[in-house]
Image (cartoon, grey):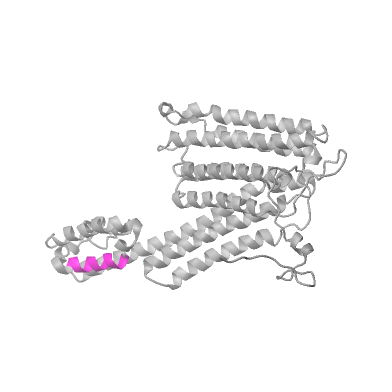
């Protein structure tokens, strides 16, 4: 019905005012299947086609790391030594896998069909890490060996992919020179052995092995060896170093995302602190502002002192590696401050519920229907039925209210005259108090 075509005008321009030369410049290039990571120079010039900034694909991949971290943080509260060790353990697995991917990408990754296929595989692996993180508690009383077997397989698959990627880089190197054949071959051999080491751990987590024969620490020994090998080889053969790459930018962007993950936690904390109190309070606002200030100071601590020049080869590698304790520290500080704020709020609610029970029972001496109505008012103020996590708790709390109202004389002067110790009300109310605060 409609025919859209470009027609030339008398001055040699098309209808859109673009000359043929400008049209050629606007032509969309097809994505190549695979690209050499080295500049197209003659001879044995092994100058890498280095990028000085991250591309969209790398930033997209970073989101999978942060999504894993956010999911694991929201489902695993740090309440004791075991949960702290489990949190650091999974964070180490995620971080060092991300780091090894980055070390390859900043030197050899050029956008192509092959590179995007590799990234898709890495996306799937990180989605698998999210599955593993749902029940990651090595050494604890409750452990899931199936998840640990999946983790070993995912680590095996990721290292096999690394070996293939370095193998492709070796192919392009050998087309120009054999000078770097040895270090790349050593890298590939190391990755194949590391992949085999991860896969060899799968039988240790069979259903009949109990707690996995206590070999969880082997994961971290392998990761440390892998880190040392890749960094060591790039230090000895300086042509494989990270000098003039965008490694510093990649570490800075991940740091920003880690702090950003904390911002997500702050919004959740605001919902919990403000939502449960029914609105804004001076204390709640003060707690939230303190958390925000902590995040701002962390951002200032890092980015106000971020280097604007390239370090030496060895110093740059140490600088990049030290981001692991930095990132785990940032996560710990932000999450810890949020838990402190929530704990303060829980104690405040605990005190308020106790005061209300004390008033209606010990001071007003309500009984029967009057007592039931007063307790029901307390329950409704908590809005248990409106929250998904406490919806099922509402019926349990109401059953406690009915049980208390059916007890004759529970709040009589005779029953409340001689309360023991620091008790504010008869012990019969303890179950009700506990049920209300359990949400």
**Left or right side of 377 for 182:** right
Specify the farthest residue to the front.
Answer: 1
83 or 37, nearer to the observer: 37
Magenta span: 371-382
* Vertical position of residue 62 compared to residue 161: above or below: below
Quarter of the figure with residue 163: top right
* Vertical position of residue 247 compared to residue 146: above or below: below
Q: Residue at left 72%, top 39%?
A: 231
Could you tell me residue 376's position as x and y percent? Answer: 23, 66
118 or 80, nearer to the observer: 118
**Left or right side of 360 for 201:** right
**Can you say which quadrant of the picture contains the C terminus?**
bottom left
Specify the farthest residue to the left.
Answer: 408
Query: Is 381 inside the magenta-drawn segment?
Result: yes
> How would you classify the magenta stretch by its main secondary structure?
helix
Could you tell me residue 261's position as x and y percent? Answer: 54, 57
* Vertical position of residue 350 compared to residue 95: above or below: below
Q: Residue at left 46%, top 61%?
A: 268
Looking at the image, can residue 151 be seen? Answer: yes
Could you tell me residue 121's position as x and y percent? Answer: 58, 42
Could you tell me residue 339's position as x and y percent? Answer: 46, 57
Query: Is 245 inside the magenta-drawn segment?
Result: no
**Left or right side of 389 for 219:** right
């Amino acid at each position: 019905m409609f025919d859209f075509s470009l027609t030339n005008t008398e001055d040699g321009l098309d209808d859109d005012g673009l000359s043929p030369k400008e049209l050629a410049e606007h032509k969309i290039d097809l994505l190549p299947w695979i690209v050499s990571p080295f500049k197209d120079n003659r001879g044995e010039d092994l100058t890498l086609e280095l990028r000085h900034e991250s591309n969209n694909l790398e930033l997209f991949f970073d989101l999978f790391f942060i999504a894993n971290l956010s999911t694991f943080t929201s489902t695993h509260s740090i309440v004791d030594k075991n949960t702290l060790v489990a949190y650091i353990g999974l964070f180490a697995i995620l971080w060092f896998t991300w780091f090894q991917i980055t070390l390859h990408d900043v030197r050899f990754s050029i956008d192509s069909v092959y590179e995007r296929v590799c990234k898709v595989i890495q996306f799937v692996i990180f989605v698998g890490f999210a599955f593993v993180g749902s029940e990651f508690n090595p050494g604890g009383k409750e452990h899931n060996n199936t998840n640990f077997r999946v983790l070993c397989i995912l680590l095996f698959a990721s290292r096999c992919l690394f070996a293939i990627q370095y193998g492709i880089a070796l192919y392009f190197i050998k087309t120009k020179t054999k000078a770097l054949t040895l270090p790349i071959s050593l890298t590939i051999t190391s990755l194949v052995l590391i992949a085999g080491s991860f896969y060899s751990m799968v039988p240790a987590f069979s259903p009949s092995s109990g707690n996995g024969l206590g070999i969880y620490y082997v994961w971290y020994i392998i990761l440390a060896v892998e880190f040392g090998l890749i960094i060591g080889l790039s230090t000895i053969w300086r042509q494989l170093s990270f000098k003039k790459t965008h490694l510093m930018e990649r570490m800075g962007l991940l740091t920003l995302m880690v702090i950003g993950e904390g911002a997500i936690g702050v919004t959740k904390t605001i919902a919990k602190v403000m939502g449960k109190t029914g609105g804004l309070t001076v204390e709640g606002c003060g707690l939230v502002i303190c958390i925000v200030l902590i995040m701002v100071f962390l951002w200032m601590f890092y980015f106000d002192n971020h280097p604007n020049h390239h370090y030496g080869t060895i110093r740059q590698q140490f600088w990049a590696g030290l981001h692991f304790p930095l990132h785990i520290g940032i996560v710990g500080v932000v999450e810890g401050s949020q838990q402190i704020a929530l704990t303060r709020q829980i104690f405040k609610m605990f005190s308020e519920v106790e005061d209300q029970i004390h008033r209606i029972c010990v001071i007003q001496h309500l009984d029967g229907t009057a007592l039931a109505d007063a307790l029901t008012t307390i329950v409704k103020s908590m809005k248990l039925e409106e929250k998904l996590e406490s919806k099922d708790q509402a019926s349990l709390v109401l059953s406690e209210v009915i049980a208390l109202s059916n007890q004759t004389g529970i709040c009589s002067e005779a029953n409340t005259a001689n309360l023991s110790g620091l008790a504010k009300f008869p012990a019969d109310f303890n179950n009700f108090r506990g049920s209300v605060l359990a949400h």
